[in-house]
Image (cartoon, grey):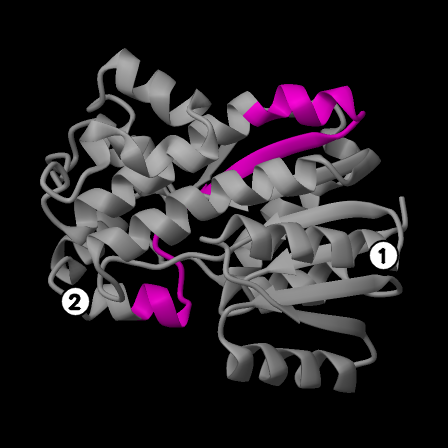
Amino acid sequence: MTGVLVVIGVGGMGEVIARRLGAGRKMLLADFNAQLLEAAATKLRGEGYAITTAAVDVSVRESVAALAATAAGLGPVTDVVHTAGLSPVQASVEAILAVDLLGVAHMLDEFGAVIAPGGAGVVIASMAGTMAAGQLPPEAEGALALTPADQLLSLPFLSSAAVPNPGAAYGLAKRAAQLRVQAASLAWGNRGARVNSISPGVISTPMGQAELSGESGEMMRAMIAVSGTGRIGTPSDIAEAAAFLLGPSASFVTGTDLLADGGVVAALRSGALPTPTA
């Protein structure tokens, strides 16, 4: 299906995904960072892509609603890729929860209202969310999945007193992304559309390299070393996963998470390394 492709977050993975999927179609790029957005748009326009840009703050529902309206004004919204996020070395607990958790909830709600029949969405989560899956009680997972977006950050276990550090916030937010995609697949399905998440491992983006240089870098390198592939991931690896989930070959796939981590989680679960704690 040819329609409008929306890419939210154009740093690292976002630009590569746009390049992989955007040829011959209208594309709306959105980001909070105006300088980064314009640089990506200029580069892609120079390569022949048809680009419209829009500023967005995913932590603000009205901003995401305006972005969805802009996308719908360009034509049928057939593909939405949400890569916007902050990592533990970049931001505070509060900022990570606002962007990585609440931002995903806003995108699923607002684009779920405009996605075209036959369309699909992809949310970039993280293997950190997969690792957090067994650490939360069922009632907490249920709350992360189903609490209305405007009440999410009021959940007691997401308070600043309850979340000890940015790493813990990141794991919670990415687990919430996986759970909310699963729950949102029903509403998206009512419009004849699909939505899934991808949980990357360590990817060689500016964000990934910053994490490797941070306090968790030694553990991350150790995880890569014992993984089945033994290498860091590339943005192209994730772009190919997104292309599959958005394309016709995945027409029976919705409400699920694709773990694209090079085998890190499998290695941890097999006992090759102790599972890291937040």
Q: Residue at x 15, y 57 (%)?
A: 216
* Image location of residue 56, percent across then percent down: 56, 63
Find the magenta span and give its range. 184-209
Vertical arrangement, residue 15 with respect to residue 74, above or below: below
How many numbered marks have been drawn onto this rendered protein structure? Answer: 2
Q: CA distance from mark 1 to mark 2?
A: 42 Å
Residue 234: x, y in percent?
A: 47, 61
- Please check the rendered image and state whether residue 208 is part of the magenta-colored stretch, yes or no: yes
Name the residue carrying label 2: 214
In the image: residue 137, left or right of residue 251:
left
Residue 71 in view here = yes
Q: Secondary structure at mark 1?
A: helix
Q: Nearer the viewer, residue 15 or 105?
A: 105
Nearest the viewer among 129 and 261 is: 129
Which quadrant, please, contains the N terminus?
top right
* Residue 250, percent from left and from top: 72, 31
Q: Amino acid at mark 1?
A: Gly
Name the residue that disc number 1 marks.
73
Which is nearer the eye, 258 or 229? 258
Q: Residues within 10 Å of mark 1 (few under 14, many from 20)?
A: few
Residue at image position (29%, 25%) is 133
* Residue 136 in picture, x, y percent from top left: 22, 22
